[in-house]
Image: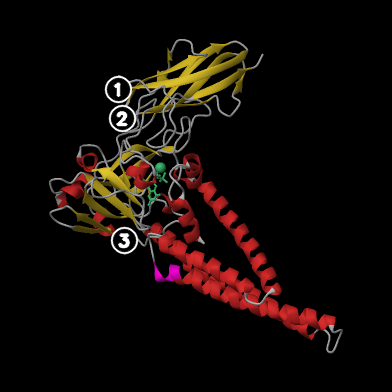
């Protein structure tokens, strides 16, 4: 079922952008699974009715569904014999059970019709068999659950991981970096609130004891690194704000965390990239890939092979045991979770997961800003001084100023809190005196190079949304 769902996700046509965005959110995976469950129940009812009318008709329906399952597994990047056998075995068992139960049901119906030598015998047999079938289904479910229980084992292994102290700790958060307005999001996003985006329907369970990272491709020396080896390196800790290319203007697919890891440039320096290489294709256990410019991974920025998030080992959903975090690039071209390979290559020779699906090969994060306060959809407030607040980001460049305008009037400069670093978001706030009425409020940021945020509204595809976050505020009388 996960394979079919994954195939559905992968098959999303590049044109269906908004749908794709919705699909990769966490809640929508549940919707996808529930929807598939309903389809399966309907198919089962159809197969039962068909089999009752005509012998083998229902069995054929079940068989076709099983083949669809096999085909879906075949399209998945991570092909295992178990994954392949599962839909086959399920379909065969379901077909046998279906044929058998319908025969019993017909026997019972026939006996009722012939009125009654030994009434109840066929009925009893049918019910016994139905109960047997249900029990077999439950046992099968438990076995499948045990197989999935691998995730639980990895959770325990995660508890045992001891993160070392950073050789270079995160610089302290400057005083006043939190604007201190009610309704603002915390400057550092707690792990449980951190947005999650990936194509994985079930969280990959990666055993930290057997995890290895391979550096391959156009390098002088291939490298293999295990977790103990990685944890023994001089690790650094930095705050970095990562964002999703699917984040709409004003959206919340962005978060700021304190990451602990080893600079990717040091690993690549050991491997020795060869002349002509310009991309690193990072691959996760589930086959997903990101293509990151080699120069971004070797310049002075803190691109990390991260093991820690806000003082803990990475949560399973955020890539345990090891992921990439690259300041300044959208996640889809850089932030590979459950990473197991870095392949040094060329953009001309290799394409990452999202590239043939209609998203740009390169994905630098676009500067943006957001109004979080006053909070909520209608944003109705009392008259007088109305406090506005929010965040602005231009990763690896930094924010110089944030301005607000009311009803397309002149821009007014907001108070900008000091950033933790140019790689994180900045908080801002501004009080504006407003009489009762309805107002349109817009925000724009300017980066430390002096470039102002792009006013032109553009959708998230192919390389990130632009435009001003615009909200309506209702000042009550
Ligand atoms: N293995 C894997 N890593 C992945 C993805 C994925 O689909 N699979 N999605 C990327 C995208 S699009 C984003 S925005 C970030 C999100 O990281 P987060 O879920 O920790 O916030 O992870 C990136 N890493
Ligand atoms: Mo993303």
- Gap between marks 2 and 1, in whole Å? 9 Å
Which residue bears the numbered disc 3?
211
- Gap between marks 3 and 2, in whole Å? 33 Å
Residue 266 drawn in magenta: no
Near-viewer residue (99 or 166)? 99
Which residue bears the numbered disc 1?
448
Which image quadrant is residue 433 in? top right
Element class at badge 1: loop
- Gap between marks 1 and 3, in whole Å? 41 Å
* Tag 2–tag 1 contact (CB < 8 Å): yes
Residue at image point 61% right, 26% down: 378
Residues rendered magenta in the picture? 80-84
Residue at image point 31% right, 30% down: 422
Q: Of the two numbered discs 1 and 3 on the same chain, state the one appearing first in sequence.
A: 3
Which residue bears the numbered disc 2?
422
Near-viewer residue (19 or 429)? 19
Residue 323, placed above or below residue 53: above
Q: Write down which quadrant ligand 2 falls in.
A: top left
């Amino acid at each position: 079922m996960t394979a079919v769902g994954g195939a559905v996700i992968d098959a999303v046509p590049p044109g269906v952008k908004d749908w794709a965005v919705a699909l990769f959110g966490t809640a929508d995976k549940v919707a996808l699974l529930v929807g598939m469950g309903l389809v399966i129940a309907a198919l089962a009812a159809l197969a039962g009715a068909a089999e009752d009318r005509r012998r083998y008709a229902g069995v054929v329906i079940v068989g076709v569904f099983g083949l669809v399952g096999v085909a879906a597994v075949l399209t998945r990047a991570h092909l295992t014999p178990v994954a392949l056998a599962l839909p086959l075995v399920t379909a065969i068992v379901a077909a046998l059970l279906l044929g058998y139960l319908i025969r019993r049901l017909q026997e019972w119906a026939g006996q009722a019709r012939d009125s009654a030598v030994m009434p109840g015998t066929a009925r009893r047999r049918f019910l016994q068999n139905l109960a047997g079938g249900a029990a077999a289904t439950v046992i099968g479910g438990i076995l499948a659950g045990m197989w999935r229980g691998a995730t639980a084992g990895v959770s325990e292994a995660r508890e045992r991981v001891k993160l070392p102290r950073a050789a270079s700790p995160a610089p302290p958060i400057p005083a006043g970096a939190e604007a201190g307005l009610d309704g603002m999001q915390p400057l550092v996003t707690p792990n449980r609130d951190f947005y999650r985006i990936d194509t994985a329907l079930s969280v990959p369970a990666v055993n930290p004891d057997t995890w290895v990272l391979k550096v391959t491709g156009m390098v002088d020396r291939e490298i293999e690194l295990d977790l103990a080896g990685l944890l023994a390196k001089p690790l650094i800790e930095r705050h970095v704000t990562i964002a999703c290319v699917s984040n709409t203007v004003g959206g919340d697919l962005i978060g700021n965390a304190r990451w602990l890891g080893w600079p990717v440039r040091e690993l690549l320096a050991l491997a020795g990239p060869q002349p002509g290489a310009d991309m690193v294709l990072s691959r996760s256990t589930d086959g997903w890939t990101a293509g990151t410019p080699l120069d971004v991974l070797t310049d002075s920025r803190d691109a990390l092979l991260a093991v820690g998030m806000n003082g803990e080992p990475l949560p399973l959903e955020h890539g345990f045991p090891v992921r990439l975090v690259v300041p300044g690039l959208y996640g889809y071209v850089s932030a590979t979770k459950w990473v197991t390979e870095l392949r040094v290559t060329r953009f001309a020779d290799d394409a990452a997961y999202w590239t043939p699906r209609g998203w740009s090969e390169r994905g630098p994060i676009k500067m943006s800003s957001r109004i979080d306060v006053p909070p909520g959809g209608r944003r109705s407030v009392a008259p007088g001084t109305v406090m506005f607040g929010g965040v602005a980001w231009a990763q690896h460049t930094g924010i110089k100023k944030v301005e607000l305008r009311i009803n397309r009037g002149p821009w007014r400069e907001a108070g900008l809190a000091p950033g933790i670093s140019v790689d994180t978001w900045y908080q801002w706030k501004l009080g504006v005196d407003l009489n009762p009425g309805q107002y349109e409020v817009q925000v724009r940021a300017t980066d430390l190079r002096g470039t102002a945020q792009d006013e032109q509204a553009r959708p998230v595809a192919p390389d990130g949304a632009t435009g001003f976050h615009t909200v309506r505020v209702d000042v009550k009388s």
